[in-house]
Amino acid sequence: MKSLEQSNNDLLWGNENPQYANQAHKWNHRWGSRPETYMQNDYGKVLSTLFARSADRDKKHTKEARETGKFSAVPDAPIDALIKLWNEILPHRTILLDDGKVSVKHVSLGKDYHGKEMSDGERVALYLMGQCLCAPAGSILVIDEPELHLHSSIMQSLWDKLEEAQKDCLFVYITHDLNFASTRVSTTSIWVKEFDGASKWSWEAVPEIDEFPESLLLELLGNRRTVVFVEGEKGGKDHAIYQSVYRTYHVVPRSGCQRVIESARALRLNESFHHISVFGLIDRDFRTDAEIQSLANSGVHCIDVAEIENILLNENTLRLVAKNQLLNPDDVVARATTMAIDLLKNDIERQASLRTYRAIENRLSQIDTKPVGLDAIKKSIADSAASIDVDAIFAENVKLYTELSTLNEVLKYYNNKGLVQNICSIFELGKNGYEKLVLRMLNSDERDVVLDGLRQYVPTLNPGTLKCAG
């Protein structure tokens, strides 16, 4: 317990004596001439200041009441604000700061324990609240790693409340937690590109890119590798396959193909704001060669199979799994090829129809939208529709699927998510057993053999050039 002046001086300047309340003493003693790394030991000083602020408030209020003979509302001291804030973000614990002591009560158990027995998270929360609430008006508060020892749900709420309580202070966060960084609304975000270890920093403000989540943008800007957007979800099958093939790249799942396309195009259109090379990878699906080339021009490339599941049925991998299961590799490849072609023969009309719809949709998307007025719009639509020879497109697609005769050709054009499961029955591995075995092999001594098979169907991505690996 100290006076308010002593407590403030000790916390802010590193010495309770007012003659040392200056920047020179603070630099040399409180920060040890190394303010960026010098370890602080001011937990007790924070608590002392909190108690001194309350004592000073109580003294002034008592004096005013005696002089006026009237009761007036008691203003909140930092301790009162801290207790309210604590109860909001940590409702399962009740904190008490009284008579120079700290104690905590477990709400559900009804047990009290001393402040010295608080968890690291509780101690950090108390310390950060006290530091911020005791900061003088107009302070710049630099918080390094605000996520330290705090659960993400508590962390966001804590800093929201502290910013609200100290509206006249500037909060600067240094963090690697990108989700937390993205929760700071109406802020300026800065990403540090590099530091020379002495005095030179290279940094830029994070750009605002429409329809691109800031959390993802921060993640990408903070990495040093080429970014590859892919379909699927994080931790899913697509992600596992692509991350194994592009091991030195930063693979980012974006759910569906449209989000992959939008993400790749958005970053490529804003290349002046960042340093990273960006590509997109999507399934071939029913896309025409013209569509595929158009996408490639914007950095989005199609793998050489109809859908990612098909890539697992390449001949190299089939032979490897056959050997692993003590089966004849030649026999397995022959059976898989026959099964794939037989499945396709019963599905030609549906596949040709879907591919025809896709071609028509692509042609209609190129409709001339310059004409103005109802009659002009009708004419433009009619002209666009008239230019599409549906019979010829359908006949061409039927011919395409009818003439597929090799396993590679089927994998390239046949969209059927049940294809892998059907061929998997050859190995009698159970539902999804084949997929799981192949993915496990990507982390085994057979990794290189599996990758050789997969790489036949994906492009080799280089920041300067791009060539197909198949």
Image (tube, rainbow, N blue to C red):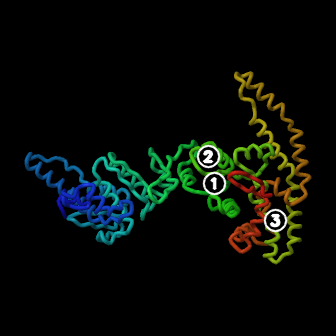
Within-10-Å neighbours for mark 3: few <14, some 14–19, many 20+: many
Res. 379 mark: none
Q: Residue at x 84, y 32 (%)?
A: 387
3D distance between C-alphas at marks 3 and 2: 39 Å
Q: Nearer the viewer, residue 118 or 353?
A: 118
Q: Position of residue 451 (x, y in %)?
A: 74, 66
Choose mark 3 or mark 2, whichever is in front: 2
Residue situated furthest bottom in the rendering: 326
Residue where numbered disc 3 is placed: 423
* Mark 1 and mark 2 residues within 8 Å of each other at the beta carbon: yes
Q: Earlier in the sequence, mark 1 or mark 2?
A: 1
Q: Residue at x 14, y 51 (%)?
A: 60
Q: Secondary structure at mark 3?
A: helix
Q: Secondary structure at mark 1?
A: strand
Residue where numbered disc 2 is placed: 267
Residue where numbered disc 1 is placed: 227
Within-10-Å neighbours for mark 1: few <14, some 14–19, many 20+: many
In this view, 353 is above or below 242 = above
* Residue 236 shows in this picture: no
Q: Nearer the viewer, residue 102 or 418?
A: 102
The three-letter code of the residue at mark 1 reads: Val
Q: Position of residue 43 (x, y in %)?
A: 30, 65
The three-letter code of the residue at mark 2 reads: Leu
* Residue 271 shows in this picture: yes
Q: Position of residue 383 (x, y in %)?
A: 81, 28
Q: Secondary structure at mark 2?
A: helix
Image quarter of residue 149: bottom left
Q: Earlier in the sequence, mark 3 or mark 2?
A: 2
Choose mark 1 or mark 3, whichever is in front: 1
